[in-house]
Structures are given as structure tokens and as C-alpha cells.
Image (cartoon, coloured by chain):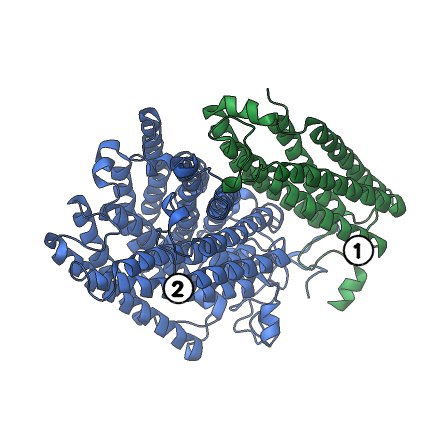
Chain colours: A blue, B green
């Protein structure tokens, strides 16, 4: 390295002729790519596909619930379809959604690196994910599985459905998640651009960091749990099956030790996106940077200590239910810190109501409802009544769909011009967002009511008093489906004939906006140097485009 | 690009790293984080062990008598020895003594193979007297209704560990191939170093398994 460093402003090339999408052509340049952006796009295509599959399954379920008892499918099919809906949405869509797709594309760009630390490993994780997905598809083709996505023993060790191929698929996909986590942790530690100290990391990166820690610490436990379950089914090792002297509650402990932290794998990256959106579209330094950054880590940490709240009615000791309930309430603190800081950021900001911001505000509404109903479920006496009812279903969808999916859509719209180089139709985007919001509430608000009145979840049949609410919910699911189709339509249109996107359409300050849209093959033509924090809107924009000429660059 | 690559004396530095040091640090940190995931992977089995031992302490002391302490002890020594040869292989690579480094890697593989052979004899002896994992368990020598669960845990733990030993053999074999092609030396020994980290973990897990399974009474 030269001792003298020339720091200067690098103007951004608008509408570049060659970029990461076209510098190499042909199928092989995609399938064997080690470019994090292309791998991220392949993830994006896969998760959109599986979201579509999971969504169709959900529509089928809602259709079947139009009237009590049989409409058009029998009870066994219904059991298989709700299991597949859960398994596909969780393991194939929502866990890889933000980190592996958007995170992969933007993590290196936002820290000024050329790629993730282990690009080949990154490609390997994608193929491992695909390999695992094949097993789950195989399982679907062979009759599916009717255990619910939680695979509880002893039912999962005795039912006749294709449990082994499904759990093996999830086992395999776990490794994809682990390797992505390893890759992200090392990338954030070792690959940051000069001047990008921890205190200047974009909050999306902080959230990916917290997520990666959970992925690395929790997913191996799922792997061993599913391995034990597979062994239980094939060899009858007797650890979980009471008929062989095992303990089914032990399975629940094992399963939720992963799967509770896993819900933070799903939601924490969404928090990161919301931080970016709210700061950018409020034109204001984020309020409580460190509070938001560290609350992600706090959630990651406390998230490991609350798994027992899934088992309040499974016969664990009173003392442990009390401790788990207390710790569950405790998670509300870092989460509340985030919500309040976002609102404080918007306060007196000059809010620019573009579609990504619309999603962020919808997220605040929906996630707050989801979060507070979660506290209700964490309260012991209330949970005895609400356990395994539609209330839980509604809570989970408010945090996962109203939270993660809305944030994902916000992030997708926010970064769409950056990674595709095209603008989408803003008016259509706003209309679709409102349709989604209406459809979402129509689908899931009635489920809170039904649940509190005692409608059990996963039931094929129900008493007639619930029919009106079930029908509201079903109509809502159609509105939701229509909203997603509109989004799919105008995003495709934007790819085909969208207006070319400028490098910084929203006036952001973090590094991804300081390079061309779409990005060059190596993200930056120079080594970027960071002087200010990513939300320092009061600093001149030229200060954010500093860099040094590097012998390694082109 | 071609010009700058030619200027770069160490061509093993991948395009996205600034220098060899950053690449080495990243690889090493990646391996450490991966080892954490391995510990949690085995951690699940250790938890199963703890739970069942806490519930059936008498079963564990009874069943452990069926395990051959001598064979397990020899295996422990063999693995500890292989950790030494692995560490020496790294040291020799750092000193550009590739011949000795390869020799040490070969000794490590030899130790790993001895370990697996001994394991094979232990397993076949148990199968012979009817100690199978799970439902096929037919052994009548232990008077306890949950005797099969002890051996399920035993087979899961040692089996998973054995798979890791086999993976280690593969990795070290690959290191020998690359070393013969002259890939390593004092300027670049990252793969040997991080495979060494993995190998030590495999060793350490066995050091926990041996007393927990063989030496209880």
C-alpha cells in the first residue's frame, strides 16, 4: 500500500452501459457466478416463486374455510395443505427472504466491499438451499405431510405422510442459512471500507449482523433436532417417542430453542430495512442510532431465552413458565425502543411519502399490533385461553406478514431502482400498497376476534357462529392476492419498459447510493472512503462520495 | 485487471480482498464462527445426554460397563497424537518445509484411520451381541427398561463424531494433494491452518465424549 493516499470525490456515472447484469452473458455466467448481486437475484427469484406457491396454498385453505365442514377438499388434504403452507412460507420464503436476497445484494455494497468474504461459499449456500427445496418439493409430490410445520412428536414419528423427505429438506436448508450467517458475520467484521467504523454502519447492516448471529447459534440446534427426529422415524431411537421410552416435550424444547430465535431471524432484518426507509424518507438523522443498533443485538440475545413460551400448556414446571413469561415481556423493551425511535425520527422530519415509506408506515401500524398481541400471549393466564387458537395465527401473521413481508416489500421498492436500474410506476405502487393493507387487515383482524372467542387453529370444521368472520377473512385473502398480483405486474412492466433509474432516486446517504444504478460488476470503481454516518443529511453530498484510487480497481 | 494481477506478487489473493492479511484473517474468523456452529450442533446431543442421565443416573452407570474403556482410551491417545501432528504440519508449512509438512499431514490421516478402525471393531462387537440403536436393540445383559436409549445416544454422538473424522480425512487428503502441487508455504498456509482448527475441534469433542460415555461409574 502506498503511504500517500489521495482522497477525492468520485462522481457517480449515471446510466452506465456495462454493469453487473450485463458485463457477462449466458446462463453459465449466472449459474456459476460468485458475484453476490447475481446470487442475491437468484435467491430473490426463488423466494418469489415459493411465496407464490405458499400463497396459493393459503388461498386454498381460506377457500375451504368458507363454510363449516367440507367445501371442496377432505380433512386430510386440508391438514397437508396447512402444513405445506407453513413449511414453505417459513423455511423456503421468509427465512431466506431479507438476508439471503436483499442482504446478499446490498450488504457488500453498503459497506463498500467488492463482495462478501467467501463468494464461493455464498454460491454454495444458494445451491444447498435449492437442494433442500428439491426435497421439500419431493415431499409435496409424495403426498405431503400433515404434522404442521412444527413436526411435533409423537405424531410426526407415527404418521404415514412424507415426514422424512420434508424434514431432511429443512435440515439441508438449515446449512444454507448457517453458511450465509457465517459469511455475513465475517464480511461485516473484515470487509468494511476505510473509515466505516462500527458507529457508522447503516442500521440495515447492524440488523443483518444480529440476524447472522442468531442464524449461526440457533440453526445447528434445529439441524440436530431434525436429525434426531429422522433417526426416531427410521430407527426408533426412543429419545422423543413416548412409546419407546422417550419424551415428546423434550422435542418441543429442542425445536423451539431454534424456532423461537428463528422468528427473530425473520423479523430483525425487517427492522433494519425500516430504519433505512424511515431515515431516508424523513430526510433526518436517525433518532437514537445506538439504541436501534444495540436493540437488535439485545433482541438476538434475549430471543434465545424465551422459547418456553410456546410450551405454557405442554406441562413444563410452573417456575419455568413464570421465568419464560417474564423474559418474553422483556423482549418487548428493545422492540419498543425501536418503534419509538422510528417515530421520533419521523417527528419534525420532512417526510416524503413515496411507496417505500408508505410500506414503512404500514409496518409500524401492523407490527405494533402484532407485537402487543404477542405480549398478550406471553401473559400466562391469558395464554391458557388463547393457546392454539386463531388469536395465535393472527398474531403470527401480523408480525410475520404485516411486519416482515411489508418491510420486505418496502425494501424491495426502495432498492429496486438500484439493483435493476429501472423505476417502477409510483402511482400503481401506492395503490397496490393500500390494497395490500386493506386486504391484510381484512384477512387477519377477524382472526383475533375468532381466536379470542375460542376458534381453534388448524381446524377443518367450525361451529356456525364463526362463519361470517371466516368469510370476511377469506374475502380479505382474495384482496391480498390481488394486491400481490398488481405488484408483480408493475414490477415486471418496469423491467420491460421502466424509465432508467438515477443513481440516487431517494436522496439516500449510505454507500449503495454512491455508485451507479445498476451497480458495476465490482460495486465501486474506486475504494470508497467513509467520512460521515449514513444518516448525516446535514452534510454535503460530495462528502459521501469520497474515495481513493486503488491498484486493485479497474 | 491482468496487469494489476501480474503486479500482485501473491496471486492467491482473491479479487475482493485488499491484501493477503485481510484474506487470512477472514478465512480464520470464518472457520472459528463455523466451529461455534459445530459446538451447538453437538450441543443438542449433549443436552439429550444430560437430560437422560439426570432422569436415569443408574442406567448410565450400568450401560457404560458395556463400553470398552481400553479401546476408547487408545482412541483418545490416537486422536490427541493426531492433533499434535496437525499442529506440526502447520508449523512446517510456515517454515517452508513442505516435505515434512506433508509427512505430518499423512501421519494425521493415519491416526484418523486407526481411530476409525478401532471404532469399527467396537461397533461390530456391539452389533454382534445385539446392541443396536433404537428398536432393533435385542441385548438382554442390562436390566433397565430404557437401556436402548443410552445406546441410541451413544451411537448418535459417536456416529456423528465419526462422520466428522471421515470428513477430516477427506480434507487433509485434499491438503496433501495441494501441498504436493506446491500450493503452500510461508506465504500461504491458510487452508492447512483452518483445517487444523477443524481437526482440533473434532479432537476436543472426542475428549468430552470419552469420559462422558466410557468413564462413568
Residue sitting at the far left: A465
Q: Is residue B15 visible?
A: yes
Q: Secondary structure at mark 2?
A: helix
For mark 2, what is the residue?
A413
Residue A416, given in percent of the width and then of the height, sits at: 44, 66
Classify 10 Å Cα crowding around label 1: few (below 14), some (14-19), many (20 and above).
Answer: few
For mark 1, what is the residue?
B10
Q: Secondary structure at mark 1?
A: loop
Q: Is residue A303 visible?
A: no
Answer yes or no: do the residues labelled 2 and 1 have beta carbons within 8 Å? Answer: no
Of A370 and B158, the residue lying toward us: B158
Residue B194, given in percent of the width and then of the height, sits at: 71, 44
> Residue A176 lies in what quarter of the image?
bottom right
Of A31 and A78, the residue lying toward us: A78
Residue A265, given in percent of the width and then of the height, sits at: 44, 47
> Residue B140 lies in what quarter of the image?
top right
Amino acid at each position: 500500500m502506498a503511504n500517500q493516499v489521495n482522497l477525492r470525490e468520485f462522481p457517480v456515472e449515471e446510466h452506465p452501459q456495462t454493469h453487473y447484469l450485463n458485463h457477462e452473458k449466458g446462463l453459465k455466467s449466472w449459474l456459476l457466478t460468485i458475484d453476490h448481486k447475481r446470487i442475491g437475484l437468484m435467491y430473490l427469484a426463488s423466494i418469489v416463486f415459493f411465496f407464490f406457491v405458499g400463497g396459493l396454498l393459503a388461498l386454498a385453505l381460506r377457500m375451504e374455510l368458507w363454510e363449516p365442514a367440507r367445501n371442496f377438499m377432505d380433512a386430510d388434504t386440508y391438514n397437508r395443505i396447512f402444513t405445506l403452507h407453513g413449511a414453505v412460507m417459513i423455511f423456503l420464503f421468509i427465512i431466506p427472504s431479507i438476508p439471503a436476497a436483499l442482504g446478499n445484494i446490498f450488504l457488500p455494497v453498503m459497506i463498500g466491499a467488492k463482495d462478501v468474504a467467501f463468494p464461493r461459499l455464498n454460491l454454495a449456500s444458494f445451491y444447498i438451499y435449492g437442494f433442500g427445496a428439491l426435497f421439500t418439493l419431493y415431499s409435496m409430490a409424495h403426498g405431503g405431510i400433515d404434522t404442521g410445520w412444527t413436526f411435533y412428536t409423537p405424531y410426526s414419528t407415527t404418521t404415514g405422510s412424507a415426514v422424512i423427505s420434508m424434514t431432511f429438506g429443512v435440515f439441508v436448508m438449515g446449512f444454507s442459512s448457517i453458511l450465509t450467517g457465517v459469511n455475513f458475520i465475517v464480511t461485516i467484521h473484515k470487509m468494511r471500507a476505510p473509515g466505516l467504523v462500527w458507529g457508522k454502519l447503516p442500521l440495515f447492516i447492524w440488523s443483518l449482523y444480529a440476524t447472522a448471529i442468531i442464524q449461526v447459534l440457533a440453526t445447528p440446534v434445529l439441524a440436530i433436532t431434525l436429525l434426531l427426529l429422522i433417526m426416531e422415524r427410521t430407527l426408533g431411537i426412543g429419545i422423543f417417542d413416548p412409546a419407546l421410552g422417550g419424551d415428546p416435550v423434550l422435542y418441543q424444547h429442542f425445536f423451539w430453542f431454534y424456532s423461537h430465535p428463528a422468528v427473530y431471524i425473520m423479523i430483525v432484518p425487517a427492522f433494519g430495512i425500516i430504519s433505512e426507509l424511515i431515515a431516508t424518507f424523513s430526510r433526518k438523522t436517525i433518532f437514537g442510532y445506538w439504541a436501534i443498533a444495540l436493540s437488535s443485538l439485545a433482541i438476538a440475545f434475549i430471543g434465545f431465552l424465551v422459547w418456553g413460551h410456546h410450551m405454557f400448556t405442554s406441562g413444563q414446571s410452573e417456575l419455568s413458565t413464570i421465568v419464560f413469561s417474564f423474559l418474553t415481556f422483556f423482549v418487548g423493551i428493545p422492540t419498543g425502543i425501536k418503534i419509538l425511535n422510528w417515530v421520533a425520527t419521523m417527528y419534525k422530519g420532512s417526510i416524503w411519502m413515496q411507496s417505500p415509506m408508505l410500506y414503512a408506515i404500514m409496518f409500524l401500524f401492523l407490527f405494533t399490533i402484532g407485537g402487543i398481541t404477542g405480549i398478550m400471549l406471553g401473559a400466562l393466564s391469558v395464554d391458557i385461553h388463547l393457546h392454539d387458537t386463531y388469536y395465535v395465527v393472527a398474531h403470527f401473521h401480523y408480525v410475520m406478514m404485516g411486519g416482515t413481508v411489508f418491510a420486505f416489500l418496502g425494501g424491495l421498492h426502495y432498492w429496486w431502482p438500484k439493483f435493476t436500474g429501472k423505476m417502477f410506476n409510483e402511482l400503481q405502487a401506492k395503490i397496490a400498497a393500500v390494497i395490500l393493507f386493506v386486504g391484510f387487515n381484512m384477512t387477519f383482524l377477524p382472526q383475533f376476534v375468532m381466536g379470542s372467542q375460542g376458534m381453534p387453529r388448524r381446524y377443518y370444521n367450525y361451529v356456525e357462529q364463526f362463519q361470517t368472520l371466516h368469510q370476511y377473512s377469506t374475502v380479505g385473502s382474495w384482496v391480498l392476492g390481488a394486491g400481490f398480483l398488481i405488484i408483480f405486474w408493475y414490477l415486471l412492466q418496469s423491467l420491460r419498459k421502466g424509465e432508467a433509474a438515477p443513481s440516487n432516486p431517494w436522496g439516500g446517504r449510505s454507500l449503495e447510493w454512491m455508485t451507479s444504478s445498476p451497480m458495476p460488476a465490482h460495486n465501486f470503481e474506486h475504494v470508497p472512503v467513509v467520512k460521515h454516518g449514513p444518516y448525516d443529511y446535514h452534510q454535503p453530498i460530495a462528502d459521501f462520495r469520497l474515495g481513493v484510487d486503488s491498484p486493485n480497481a479497474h | 485487471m491482468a496487469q494489476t494481477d501480474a503486479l500482485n506478487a501473491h496471486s492467491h489473493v482473491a479479487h475482493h480482498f485488499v491484501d493477503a492479511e485481510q484474506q487470512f484473517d477472514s478465512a480464520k474468523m470464518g472457520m472459528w464462527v463455523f466451529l461455534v456452529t459445530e459446538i451447538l450442533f453437538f450441543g443438542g446431543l449433549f443436552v439429550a445426554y444430560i437430560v437422560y442421565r439426570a432422569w436415569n443416573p443408574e442406567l448410565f452407570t450400568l450401560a457404560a460397563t458395556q463400553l470398552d474403556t481400553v479401546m476408547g482410551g487408545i482412541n483418545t491417545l490416537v486422536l490427541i497424537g493426531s492433533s499434535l501432528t496437525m499442529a506440526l504440519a502447520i508449523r512446517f508449512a510456515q517454515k517452508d518445509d513442505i516435505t515434512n509438512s506433508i509427512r505430518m499431514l499423512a501421519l494425521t490421516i493415519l491416526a484418523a484411520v486407526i481411530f476409525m478402525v478401532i471404532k469399527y471393531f467396537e461397533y461390530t462387537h456391539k452389533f454382534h451381541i445385539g446392541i443396536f440403536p433404537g428398536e432393533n436393540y435385542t441385548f438382554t445383559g442390562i436390566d433397565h427398561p430404557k437401556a436402548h436409549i443410552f445406546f441410541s445416544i451413544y451411537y448418535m454422538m459417536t456416529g456423528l463424531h465419526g462422520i466428522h473424522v471421515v470428513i477430516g480425512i477427506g480434507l487433509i487428503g485434499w491438503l496433501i494433494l495441494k501441498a504436493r502441487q506446491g500450493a503452500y508455504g510461508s506465504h500461504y498456509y491458510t487452508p492447512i491452518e483452518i483445517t487444523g482448527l477443524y481437526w482440533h475441534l473434532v479432537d476436543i469433542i472426542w475428549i468430552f465424549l470419552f469420559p462422558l460415555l466410557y468413564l462413568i461409574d
